[in-house]
Amino acid sequence: MFAGHHQPPMFYDQAKIYVNSGNGGDGMISFRREAHVPLGGPDGGDGGKGGDIIFVGNRHMNSLAAFHKQVHYRAGKGVHGSTKNRHGKNGETLRIAVPVGTLIRNAETEEVLADIVEEGQEAVLLTGGRGGRGNARFTTSVNRAPRLAERGEPGQELWLLLELKLIADVGIVGKPNAGKSTLLAAVSDARPKVANYPFTTLHPSLGVVSLDDYETMVLADIPGLIEGAADGVGLGHDFLRHIERTRVLIHLLDGAAKEPLEDWAMINQELALYAAALEERPQLVVLNKLDLPDAVAWEPIIREEIEKLGYPFCSVSAVTGQGVRQMLYQVKKLLDDIPEPEPADELEVVITADDEKPFMIEREGDGWRVRGHQIERVAAMTYFEFDATLLRFQQILERMGISEALTKAGVQVGDTVHIGNETLEWGE
């Protein structure tokens, strides 16, 4: 269960690299030289094709660190043609291994060129240059001794941006200091540095958890979400990107916090703002720090609330290991109940409000209706019984311009406003 205490290599989830496919070899101009054939015919061979650049998915890699050590990648050149119709050898194709979950873009245009989502998946990004034809190919009935051959076609070159979206089975989310790194270190061979300050983890850590002899699952500690992460505040988007492809979330609550339930509601709001699919992920709510009296006091209250809302719940101490094994079996059961994801045929696109008309306002009966994919999603994920999340919802309405639009449309204090399935009363 516990592997040796090693410091994991530095994690990188983005890199910029230069790739260059091989030049084709030149064709040869040559004539047969034989003792008894004074005017030998042309026998110049073709040049070999240059090597391709191919990216290959490798599930044993979980960082783009290698691409910070080496930035330039060149495939082999085709060999020039030679005499006696000998063709040059093809240049060696360069296969570049990248972690499963790597998105490859053209660095200049940002166009997505490949999305590597499976072990062994290959993407040919640049093809090598064609080999030039030797003069033997240019013989005609009119010109039997052509002094003509082609040079090889140059290879292609490109700067690429690599971006890694971790493909972990389980993402651990929660407020800073909830104990995510400690939990991951306790259950797996990941050894993140743990310190007590608000923005503890500045990169996601991956850990492989061994449950039994052969049962394993990959956990990712998703760095502390801060309020406003979905708007790109702080390092929000860089981190949220890694949760997109996890299949189950462990939502870790800090048992020593003032209001663990409010923290839980706030993070769910962030998830809803960021990507629609996230709020549909199965979520196991886990109260941490059972080794502290505050957490013990909170436990029955939080259990009742969370289970009432239909979420599975358990409590642990990541420090002492209490309850951790039972928690892992609960997570494994959630994973086993979800069908394996289909291989992605198309790229995942997170729709932001800019890609669509963000909202519409209509008069409805004795009130108003606000329609809009994103705001309806956020409303569904907002717990209006908590002051903090209610206030945050009001800030979102203001930031999206919905409050102003409702005021212009003529909404009055006391009017009913419908958003999705929620019915709200308009206040001062």
Image (cartoon, rainbow, N blue to C red):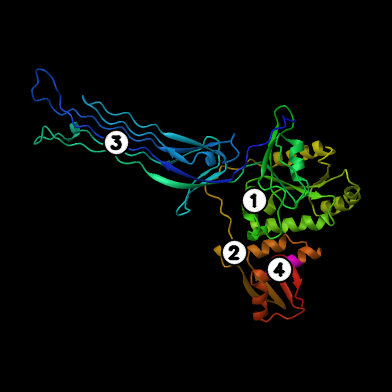
The reply to whether the C-beta atoms of the residues labelled 3 and 1 are less than 8 Å apart is no
Q: Nearer the viewer, mark 1 or mark 4?
A: 1
- Where is the N terminus found, in terms of image quarters? top right
Residue receiving disc 4: 395
How much space separates mark 3 and mark 1, taking CA atoms?
45 Å
Judging by the rendered image, the residue that carries numbered circle 3 is 131
Residue type at numbered disc 2:
Ala
Q: In which quarter of the image is residue 13?
A: top right
In magenta stretch: residue 73 = no
**Residue 373 visible, this angle:** yes
In the rendering, at what x and y percent does residue 389 appear?
76, 63
Q: Where is residue 259 in the image (x, y as percent from the top left)?
A: 84, 57
Residue position marked by numbered label 2 in the rendering: 353
391 left or right, relative to 56: right
Is residue 393 in the magenta section? Answer: yes
What amino acid is found at the position of numbered circle 1 in the picture? Phe
The residue that disc 1 covers is: 239
Q: Would you call the spot at circle 3 few (<14 residues within 10 Å), some (14-19), or many (20 or more)?
A: many
- Mark 1 and mark 4: span between their CA atoms? 22 Å
Q: Looking at the image, which residue is at 68% across and 82% down?
A: 410
- Lower sequence index among marks 1 and 4: 1
Tell me the crowding category of disc 2: few under 14, some 14 to 19, or many 20 or more residues within 10 angstroms, Cα based: some
Name the magenta segment's main secondary structure: helix
State which tag comes first along the sequence, 3 or 2: 3
Q: Distance between the residues labelled 2 and 4?
A: 16 Å
